[in-house]
Image (cartoon, rainbow, N blue to C red):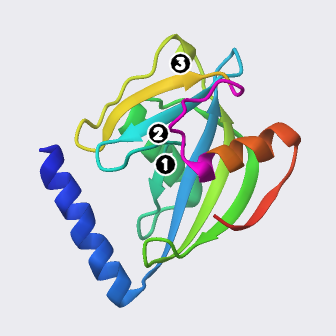
Amino acid sequence: MALMHRLAIKAARLVWRVTAPRTIGVRALLLDREGRVLLVRHTYLPHWYLPGGGVKKGESIEAALHRELAEEVGIADARIERVLGVYHSRREGKDDHIVIFVASAGGGAGDGAASTDALEIEAAGWFALDALPATTSPATRRRIDEYRSGATGLGSW
């Protein structure tokens, strides 16, 4: 099943290179009670990332963030605290704008993180901000560094 998902993503990226659609995405720098950040590892990418995804037509940015957190890691009670930044990416052939929110997990979220979408999410885990996995994506590291320094991010992904 993961192979089919990887092939579908590769096909989508080929279409995006031709059509260059404008898209908007959301990601959460989601923190638990201990100040650890939640990261996910996708089935079709080699790195750890902040959880999130695309905003669907007719969906608000806030609703998209809550939907993505529920779908990817089963967290339905995250509290949005602020916007960390808005970034632009042309990396996959899309004209993509990504809104990063700082949010806190409610309830017992820090007790464990579970992938709820086995087709997309291979693993999920909480990590100390100063002890990220070696394979954390460079952009994810930049967003976490911005958060730690108190900066508001803008510009390129």
What residue do we see at 11% from left, 44% from top?
1
Q: Is mark 2 on a helix, strand or loop?
A: helix
The answer to whether the residue labelled 2 contacts the one labelled 1, judged by CB atoms less than 8 Å apart, is: yes
**Position of residue 123 measured from the top left corner of the image (x, y, whole percent):** 37, 30
What residue do we see at 38% from left, 23% from top?
114
Q: Main secondary structure of the magenta part?
A: loop
Q: Specify the amino acid type for callout 3.
A: Ala
Residue sticking out furthest to the front:
134
Distance of label 2 from label 1 (alpha carbons): 7 Å
Label 2 crowding class (10 Å Cα cut-off): few <14, some 14-19, many 20+? many
Q: Is mark 1 on a helix, strand or loop?
A: strand
- Residue stretch in magenta: 129-140
The answer to whether the residue labelled 3 contacts the one labelled 2, judged by CB atoms less than 8 Å apart, is: no
**Position of residue 81 measured from the top left corner of the image (x, y, whole percent):** 74, 40
**Position of residue 82 measured from the top left corner of the image (x, y, whole percent):** 76, 46
Distance of label 3 from label 2 (alpha carbons): 12 Å
Residue at image mark 3: 109
Say above or below: 76 vs 106.
Answer: below
Residue at image mark 2: 69
Check residue 139 for magenta coloring. yes
Report the disc number at residue 99. Answer: none
